[in-house]
Image (cartoon, rainbow, N blue to C red):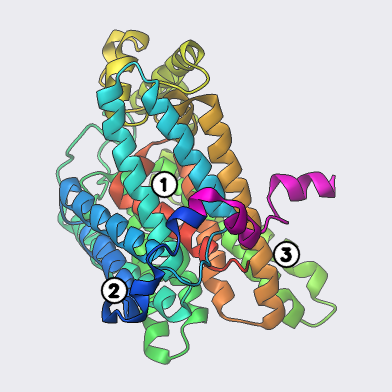
């Protein structure tokens, strides 16, 4: 069984062996390495790459998706230049291998799509996100640049969250029907800050909460620690005030995962008698705190109860109707799907959806959306990518714990973010919006950046 898991998780896979045997690697990587030797530009390549990635995080919550797309194109071109000028040929990980497989399946799905033009549009966006991942995975190998990029994201999240909290106190007009008007929570203000949608804001802030928690331990000086504590309070409060049920689910999953990692990290430092009790006490206390919040805080109680209201809640009913229609779509094109992107979905989904629900923008589940767009093969590749990423993250975390390296804290937050965003993604598809998708690939890139070939 252990051997099977090692093969499935690519634990024994060697990047150096792959590079030496891969025709694509030999053709592309390092083909212009001679240019690197006399280039001032290449000498500053990593900081300039970090600057490009920072611009994506700084602007994404505030500008149009088109402008974010231009920045992603710049990141993709820059990654290509660095790759062809790479003399060291390092940094290709099992995660990169699965990302490449995922991209190839999406390419096949696009080529065989019944709506090729619409699918190509979605495939182009998908490719840009993966190129951003590739650039970040390279840049983040530097601990200093890793800390800077995380700091940039946390500073921007503070601005976004502060405005969201202001909306709570000042009141804000709903931009869409986010809450069943007949429910007990109909009059509750749901903040959305600059992102225009409370579910999208919740997805964006999941990582901010996780990284701000570990920043308290990872950052050494007093002022950065105070900034991290402020970010914990402000980001957590704003996420809660979105009243996004999917966001709350992701928040709980990410928080529990982070607690597990922190207990695992600190247990060797505890007295021997306390170690067996550390995990049960922390998890039991956290579960009790969550139950008390549900029982004693009325808005939370009402919102959580609506999760189990089934079709009686209009928001639930909309999603349920869409979910029930997706198996029919998948069954008609099960192998490679209809092609990536929301444009392909809008064209192809209409005959499958009930008339009153044909305005659906997606499948309202990342797993269903993946199966619809790039088929069961694509869904399996995506799940395999998650398995390999989490396994690689935990493998590196064990090494960092043995070294007592504070870099392990960032790794904990990245894995917790991945798990939390996927929990949110089971019941929503804000994952596909650039404000959230860039953060998802940021977390995956952080895990990949720790890999040792």
Image coordinates for residue 32, horizontal then vertical, percent: 37, 66
* 11 in magenta: yes
**For the magenta stretch, what is the residue range?**
1-25
Secondary structure of the residue carrying tag 3 is: helix
- Asked if residue 11 is positioned above or below residue 103 in the image, the reply reads below
Q: Are marks 3 and 2 in contact (CB under 8 Å)?
A: no
Q: Is residue 427 magenta?
A: no
Residue placed under numbered mark 3 in the picture:
279
Residue 111 located left or right of residue 359: right
Q: Which residue is mark 1?
A: 247
Which residue in the structure is indicated by mark 2?
A: 48
**Residue found at the far bottom of this picture:** 221
Q: Is residue 292 left or right of residue 86?
A: right
- Of tags 3 and 2, the one toward the viewer is 2
Q: Is residue 206 left or right of residue 241?
A: right
**Of 100 and 206, the residue lying toward us:** 100
Q: Quadrant of the C terminus?
A: bottom right
Instruction: Please rate how many residues cluster around mark 3, counting C-alpha atoms within 10 Å: few if below 14, some from 14 to 19, many from 20.
Output: some
Instruction: Please tell me which residue is depicted at 27% across the width and 71% down the height of the picture.
Output: 51
What residue appears at the point 68 percent right and 51 percent down from the top-left corner? Answer: 10
In the image, what residue occupies the spot 54% across and 60% down? 92
Packing grade of label 2 (10 A; few <14, some 14-19, many >=20) is: some
Q: Quadrant of residue 394?
A: bottom right
Give percent across and percent down for residue 237.
36, 61
Looking at the picture, tell me which residue is in the foreground, 13 or 163: 13
- Above or below, 354 against 407 in this view is above
In the depicted view, which residue is nearer to us: 286 or 389? 389
Q: Earlier in the sequence, mark 3 or mark 1?
A: 1
Tell me, yes or no, if residue 90 can be seen here: yes
What percent of the width, then of the height, locates residue 433? 30, 43
């Amino acid at each position: 069984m252990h051997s099977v898991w090692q093969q499935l998780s690519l634990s024994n896979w060697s990047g150096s062996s792959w590079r030496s045997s891969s025709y694509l690697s030999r053709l592309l990587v390092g083909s212009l390495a001679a240019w690197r030797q006399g280039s001032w530009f290449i000498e500053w390549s990593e900081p300039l790459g970090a600057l490009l990635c920072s611009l994506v995080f700084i602007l994404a919550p505030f500008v149009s998706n088109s402008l974010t797309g231009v920045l992603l194109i710049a990141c993709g071109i820059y990654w290509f230049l660095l790759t062809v000028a790479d003399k060291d040929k390092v940094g290709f990980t099992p995660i990169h291998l699965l990302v490449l497989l995922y991209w190839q399946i999406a390419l096949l799905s696009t080529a065989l799509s019944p709506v090729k033009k619409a699918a190509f549009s979605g495939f182009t966006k998908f490719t840009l996100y993966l190129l951003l991942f590739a650039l970040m995975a390279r840049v983040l190998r530097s601990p200093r640049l890793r800390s800077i990029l995380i700091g940039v994201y946390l500073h921007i999240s503070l601005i976004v969250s502060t405005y969201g909290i202001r909306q709570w106190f000042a009141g804000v007009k709903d931009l869409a029907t986010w809450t069943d008007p007949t429910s007990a929570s109909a009059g509750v203000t749901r903040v959305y800050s600059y992102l225009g949608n409370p579910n999208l804001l919740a997805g964006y802030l999941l990582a901010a909460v996780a990284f701000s928690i570990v920043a308290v331990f990872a950052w050494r000086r007093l002022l950065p620690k105070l900034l991290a504590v402020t970010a914990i309070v402000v980001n957590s409060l704003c996420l809660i005030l979105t009243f996004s049920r999917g966001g709350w689910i992701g928040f709980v999953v990410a928080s529990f995962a982070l607690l597990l990692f922190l207990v695992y990290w600190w247990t060797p430092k505890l007295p021997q008698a306390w170690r067996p009790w550390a995990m049960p006490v922390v998890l039991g206390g956290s579960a009790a705190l969550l139950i008390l919040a549900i029982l004693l805080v009325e808005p939370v109680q009402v919102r959580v109860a609506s999760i189990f209201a089934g079709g009686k809640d209009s928001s639930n009913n909309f999603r349920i109707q869409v979910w029930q229609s997706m198996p029919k779509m998948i069954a008609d094109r099960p192998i490679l799907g209809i092609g990536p992107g929301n444009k392909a979905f809008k064209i192809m989904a209409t005959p499958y959806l009930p008339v009153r629900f044909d305005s659906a923008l997606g499948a309202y589940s990342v797993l269903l959306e993946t199966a619809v767009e790039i088929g069961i093969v694509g869904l399996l590749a995506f799940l395999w990518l998650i398995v390999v990423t989490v396994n690689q993250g935990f493998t590196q975390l064990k090494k960092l714990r043995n070294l007592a390296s504070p870099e392990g804290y960032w790794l904990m937050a990245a894995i917790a973010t991945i798990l939390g965003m996927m929990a949110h993604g089971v019941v929503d598809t804000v994952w596909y919006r650039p404000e959230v998708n860039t953060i998802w690939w940021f977390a995956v890139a952080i895990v990949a950046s720790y890999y040792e070939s």
